Amino acid sequence: IIFSQSFGVAAHICEFLFYSLSLSHTSRVLACAMKTVLMVAEKPSIAQGIAQCLSNGNFTSRKGASRACPIHEFTGSFMGSPAFFKMTCVIGHVFSIDFTSKYQNWAQTEEEDLFSAETVRKEASDANVVAHLKNESRDCDYLVLWLDCDREGENICFEVLSIVEKNIRGNRGLSNVFRARFSAIARSDLMKAMSSLGKPNQNEALSVDARQELDLKVGVAFTRFQTKYFQGKYGNLDASIVSYGPCQTPTLGFCVKRHDEILAFKPEKFWRIVPTAIKESWPIPLEWERGRVFDYQIAQFLHRSVQSQKTGKVIDVKSKRESKPRPGALNTVELLKDASRKLGIGSHHAMQLAEALYTAGYISYPRTESTKYPSSFDLAGTLAEHTRNPIWGKYVQQLLADGLAQPKGGVDVGDHPPITPMRTATEAEIGGGDRWRLYEFITRTFIASLSPDCKYIRTRATLRVGTETFSVVGRVMESPGFTEITPWAAFKDAKIPELVPGETVEIQNVSLKEGNTEPPDYLTEAELISLMVKNGIGTDASIPTHINNICERNYCQVKSTARHMVPTKLGVILVHGYHKIDSELVLPEVRAHIEREVANIATGAATIDFIVPQALDIFLAKFRFFKLHIDRMDELMEASFSTLASSGKTLTRCGKCMRFMKYLPSRPERMYCQNCDETYPLPSLGIIKEYKSHTCPLDRFELLLYQQGGEGKTFAVCPHCYNNPPFPEVTQRTSCNLCLHPTCAFSQVNNRVCGCQDPSCTGFMVLSPQDPPHCRMECTTCNRSVRLPKNIKRAKVDPSAQCEECGSNLLHLEWDPAKSPLPDKQPSLEACVLCDEDLNGMLQEFFCSRGRGRGRGRGRGRGRGRGRGR
């Protein structure tokens, strides 16, 4: 037992003993002299991989203040001296930028004020990462940052630094802070990074701060104004918010531009002459050198001229050896395009899959602009890793034996090497599905980039039939090269008979075929990505997010296996409206200019204090002009969408005027009172229906019943209380199961049974408003649910009667006597769901459909013991 007068001294002694007892005997002797090094990665799996490598697998793990961020501890050497390492992580960005509470209320904030509004950094998640980092950094001597090596990662470096900087002993500026730069969770990369530590780049971090502030202020200002203006007038927009984004909107503009080109296209008729030559019973389809003509009389004349000929003369035959070049190395943009075009995987999903493969150590860092490997990259060693693969292992062995081809050209930007498979794996190890398909594509492309070109013989024969010239092309494979490992790039032989200049061949079936010119197709996702890159919209990391946003906002839909980007009616009208007011809001030039300025911040060529105010002034002027001329866009809206008065269906009564309101099912779901001219947003993604004409005792509005699908949560909703919480303790947009009204039959006060039995949940189990046989209890916070017996006739909570053992409110159940499961067919039971074994054995616990899926049934005997009921 250790006593100390100072709490701080006692804490230090306990901490020392904890570390000492967890180390080996030799390390314990050295512990007093060891420096403590805190290392922080971007994700838990990366932190574990780094700890595994640097400790040679000799590390211990424990939990900290954040359950999501474990700590891995080991001993080793740092800067030539013994050191104790603590390896932990964050989970992406620690902070997010937002407006202060003063500007959060849409109704009380002028959108113009947002351009100069004060912003704050808020903790980005509820994982308690800030407290975790503060705790773990106490009394550490060094900080090593292992965040992803791009601008976002650099920004997270300084987020971490802002939390722990004061706790690093002896730190002056960045004297004891180091940056590890790596491209893969591979031993060679990690060891090299550890031996060549640098410093974090504040300019790159500031460039991310600049983009975040611009996107927040510009996007929110336009979005709030548009949403309030148009959702207050139209009932079938089918969009939760009418959003604007400095990158999102130009992205949509590309799709709408192609849509307009398709509608404006006027087809023209054309005619083609298609004869067939015959040699030794071998039909040879011929291509007309003119291609096609648009004058029918000329086409008829030329057709008769060719049709009158029975033979054609071979005037030229040329054969030459050609090659199909092997693919280049993959950067992020090329991977996204190939995933969409060749695999049918959307760019947003493909990026998520690539990041998962990276964190698992299967591929190198997936966000890179480089398409050329640095001279120091060990191509042969990386390729040799795949000799053991059961699918392509033999091909790789032969390739290594024959010698590698040098990768094609490309550009080494210096950020990361191209996306590379760092570890071989089977489909079972990867987990199958799209994750395997993407890994297989990356691996096969890498192997192909080091393989020989595909070689073939191309023969082109030219024939004269009357006055017209025709040709035929044949192609015969000579050496498949890289196409042997990339079957999607292979082709079949197109053989033609041997033809000799001067010989004649028979001509048959000379037809005149009519056709029409066709409009361009809708942009594919791959084509859209190319346009975004060409015009400087977004970065390789953000492009998938912008594309995903225009789809989630219902501005664009992905159709067909080719993933065509087809704009919706709302998307088309918004872009046309921007053009009528200010085309620069949708054209890419303004955003491309801002992206260039942000890049200048990253390189140190410009400062954030100059660029951000300048850009905000530009967009403020545009916003004022847009607001002044919003009627130009409204003209288009009015012609395409229905007003609130003519939309929806009559459902329940308004508590103010007692007249019926209309339910508008299109996003955002809401009730509309035409007499009061007011709208009341409702919970989304569920089923809304009338609730037996029950009324709210506070405001007389008739209640609605909301259900999240078949097995989802069900609760009553008062349209007025949902948008105007009647109690200060209740947050905005609350349903009846959270209401604290003491006499309302549908409030939480009168339907609360007990506390949720999940230790990590702070919610309450309340009686759902569903009728028998679907009665159940649901948690107000998580997706836990408990079914009551199916054959009950009635269920209610008695808030005046509590369990003497745990304090839960007693549940009163009634049965028809003939169906009662109770002893002697008793018709009713009032008991505690936690402590009464008979009642507990009748319950079945599961999880609502929007959560983790259905769970297990609960049997008799699981109910004893004290609960968290109140």
Image (cartoon, grey):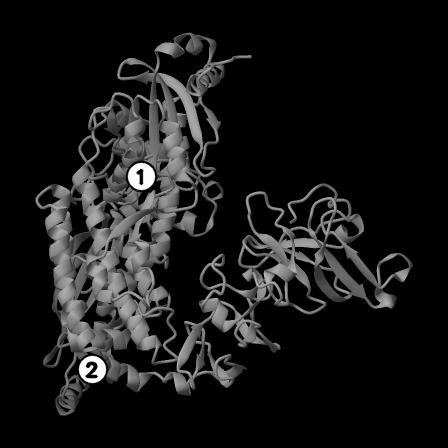
Compared with 108, 232 (above or below) is below
In-front residue for pair 475/181: 181
Task: Give the residue pinned by disc 1.
Answer: 364
| Amino acid at dot 1 | Ser
Identified at 56% across, 56% down, the residue is: 780
264 with respect to 339 (left or right): left
In-front residue for pair 748/441: 748
Residue 610 visible at all: yes
Identified at 13% across, 67% down, the residue is: 621
Q: Position of residue 608 (x, y in %)?
A: 14, 47
Identified at 71% across, 68% down, the residue is: 772
Task: Give the residue pinned by disc 2.
Answer: 264
Q: Earlier in the sequence, mark 2 or mark 1?
A: 2
Q: Quadrant of residue 502?
A: bottom left
Residue 503 visible at all: no
Instruction: List the single residue furthest toward the bottom.
Output: 297
Q: Are marks 2 and 1 in contact (CB under 8 Å)?
A: no
Labelled disc at residue 259: none
In-front residue for pair 757/559: 757
